[in-house]
Image: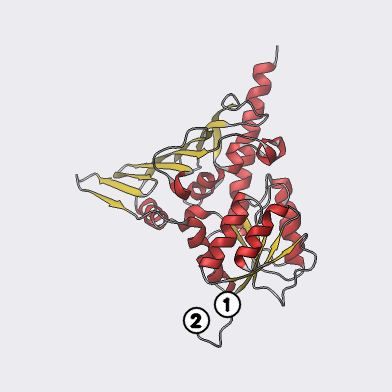
Amino acid sequence: MTVTEQAPRVAVVGAAGWAGSRHARAFAAAGANVVFLVDKDHRAYPLAQELGAVLLPSTETLRPEDLDLVVVALPTTMQPDVCADLLSRGLRVLTEKPVAADAEGAAVLAAASGVSERLMVGYTLHQHPAAPVVSQWVRDHDVVAVSVRSVAHKQKVDSWRADPKEGGVAVINGIHAIELVSSWFDGDPRVLATSASSSLYGSPVPEHVVATLEFPEGTVFNLQSYWSPWQESQGLNQGDWSLTIDVLASTGRMLWSNDSLHAWERDGSQYEKTFDPSDLFLRQAESALRFCSGETPAVTFAQALRATEIADALLAAVASRAKDELAP
């Protein structure tokens, strides 16, 4: 950056939360000027002092002439209204995934001006250096099945995560895999089987979800997503998230496990690659700053909406099974 260039100006909404604070520090590390933090919670004040930002109680005074990007990191049910308002006022927005808790909430955003041009949806999994490698491998092979295990470490499930309107672990964590895997295949998958449990923490939301879906061309997608009170020895986001994606094709197999890849080809050849641990929030901040300069985001509203609609179908199947089990 030359002396005549101005650092991109960023505001972070929901800065007192875990994700919001990670976003704020990541954008500062990426070279942005974090001008405003927006949160009514006084816990955001030390972070504002750390970053030299002004702490605001609401988004009402944010203006496009003062900012290059607004990051929204709020509970899923709150984000659509806030993002729609910011977009309608001409601001460019990065919103935490998913785009909404359900398709009904996403409709609020769909009606907002500029949603296709000025909204980036923050699916950090796309920022991992393994993601483009696996995506290309899928395009080059005839895939039979994809199996995903996605585990997020949580000491307890409370606050907004325990709100049934937020959708539980499938929407808050499993949606990462739903979005990435669905980006590889065409059409709407059919839900073949589901199972959900709330016995790990006893909260009123699904804490453990297992599902099998099938895409129109026949590829099967097996998903296991749950919150875990036990932190695993390795994982993404500084060990908070353990992810395994196993892709089986007629001509080979690729296994993505956290920061490592292992591929086997039908001819007997194989290779392994290990990546240095990535700060996915930092990599996403760097990508978002390129979005501010006109680059197409890794995940657009249309792509994020598709993932939300698939999650809706999965949760509807969970509810239907529970209703059948309770029927006399």
User: Residue 147 occupies which quadrant of the picture?
Assistant: top left
- Whether residues under marks 2 and 1 lie with C-beta atoms below 8 angstroms apart, the answer is yes
Q: Residue at x 52, y 32 (%)?
A: 229
In terms of secondary structure, where does tag 2 sit?
Answer: loop
Q: Is any part of residue 142 visible from this angle?
A: yes
Residue type at tag 1: Ala
291 or 107, which is in the foreground? 291
Estimate how packed mark 2 is, as few (under 14), some (14 to 19) or many (20 or more) residues with alpha carbons within 10 Å. few
Q: Earlier in the sequence, mark 2 or mark 1?
A: 2
Residue at the spot of label 1: 7
Q: Return the residue at label 2.
A: 1
User: Residue at the location (66% across, 56% down)?
Assistant: 15
Q: Residue furthest top?
A: 328
Q: Position of residue 27 (x, y in %)?
A: 56, 65
The one nearer the camera, 198 or 190, is 198
SS label for mark 1: loop
260 vs 5, left or right, is: left
